[in-house]
Amino acid sequence: MPRGKQVTPEMVSDVRKAKTRWPDMSNEEIGRYAGTSAATVGRILSGAYDRIASAVPSD
């Protein structure tokens, strides 16, 4: 049984955009914005999901 939401390219994009717009925002706050957990935000920002992010075109 899945433990949480699946990380999508859109989620990765939302997290990165939020961190760029609001660099002082905590991972927990970014997680609420992007619809995920603070732990997942940390993994996204550390590059763990770079292969997923490449599926989304840059803005």
Image (cartoon, helix red, strand yellow):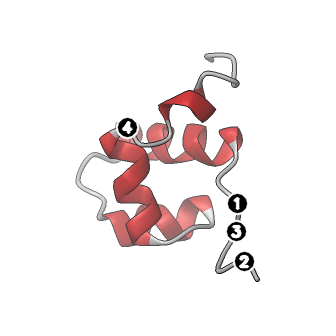
Of the image marks 1 and 4, the number of the one nearer the N terminus: 1
Residue at the left extreme? 24
Tell me the residue at 23%/54% (across/down).
Answer: 24
> Disc 2 or disc 4, which is closer to the eye?
2
Determine the secondary structure under disc 3: loop
Residue under label 3, please give it.
5
Q: Are marks 3 and 1 in contact (CB under 8 Å)?
A: yes
Instruction: For marks 2 and 4, give the CA distance.
Output: 22 Å
Residue under label 2, please give it.
2
Determine the secondary structure under disc 4: loop
Of the image marks 3 and 4, the number of the one nearer the N terminus: 3
Which amino acid does the dot numbered 2 rest on? Pro
Which amino acid does the dot numbered 4 rest on? Gly
> Disc 1 or disc 2, which is closer to the eye?
2
Residue under label 4, please give it.
47
Tell me the residue at 37%/36% (across/down).
Answer: 20
Q: Residue 45 in the image: x percent, y percent?
A: 36, 44
Q: Mark 1, residues whose alpha carbon is within 10 Å: few (<14), some, or many (≥20)?
A: few
- Name the image quarter holding the C terminus: top right
Q: Are marks 3 and 4 in contact (CB under 8 Å)?
A: no
Q: Are marks 2 and 4 in contact (CB under 8 Å)?
A: no
Q: Mark 3, residues whose alpha carbon is within 10 Å: few (<14), some, or many (≥20)?
A: few
Determine the secondary structure under disc 1: loop
Tell me the residue at 69%/25% (across/down).
Answer: 56
Residue under label 1, please give it.
6
